[in-house]
Image (tube, helix red, strand yellow):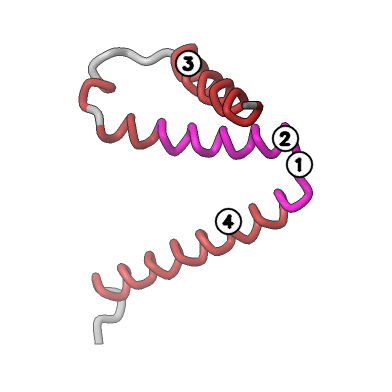
Amino acid sequence: MYEGGPIARASGVMVALALAMFGGATLGAVALTDLKGFALVAVLSFGAAALLYLVTEERLVEAHEVRETPWVTSAFFAGFLVLYLIELLS
């Protein structure tokens, strides 16, 4: 009915995103199954910091007013990892 139209395209994109999410979850589950200790903490804290960074970057208008350097981004991730390790050890 809408061959190649907006509905077919939107449906295709939706299916592709769902498959990508399923594939990523499966790959992550297989890759992280045997991780323990510090390696698992590092991977999980990096993932959490990446998500926090993305939310902060997109939601705060002030974040785009100041030029960002790689040092600031690295410090954010390192700080989150340190705090996560401190919490893990306590």
Q: Tag 1: residue type?
A: Lys
Residue behind mark 2: 39
| Chief SS of the magenta region | helix
Give the amino acid type for the residue marked by disc 3 in the picture. Pro
The residue to which callout 4 is attached is 24
Q: Amino acid at mark 2?
A: Ala
Q: At 58% from the left edge and 56% from the top edge, which residue is drawn?
A: 24
Distance of label 3 from label 1 (alpha carbons)? 29 Å
Residue lying at 71% horizontally and 56% vertically, measured from the top left: 30
Which residue is drawn at the image coordinates 58% and 61% (left, top)? 23
Which numbered mark, 2 or 4, is in the foreground of this view?
Answer: 2
Does the stretch in magenta take in 21?
no
Q: Which residue is mark 3?
A: 70
Instruction: Kindly give the residue lying farthest to the bottom in the view shown.
Output: 1
SS label for mark 3: helix
Q: Which residue is mark 1?
A: 36
- Marks 2 and 3, the one that precedes in the sequence: 2
- Mark 4 or mark 1: whose residue is earlier in sequence: 4
In the rendered view, tell whether residue 63 sits above or below residue 66. Answer: below
Segment colored magenta: 32-53
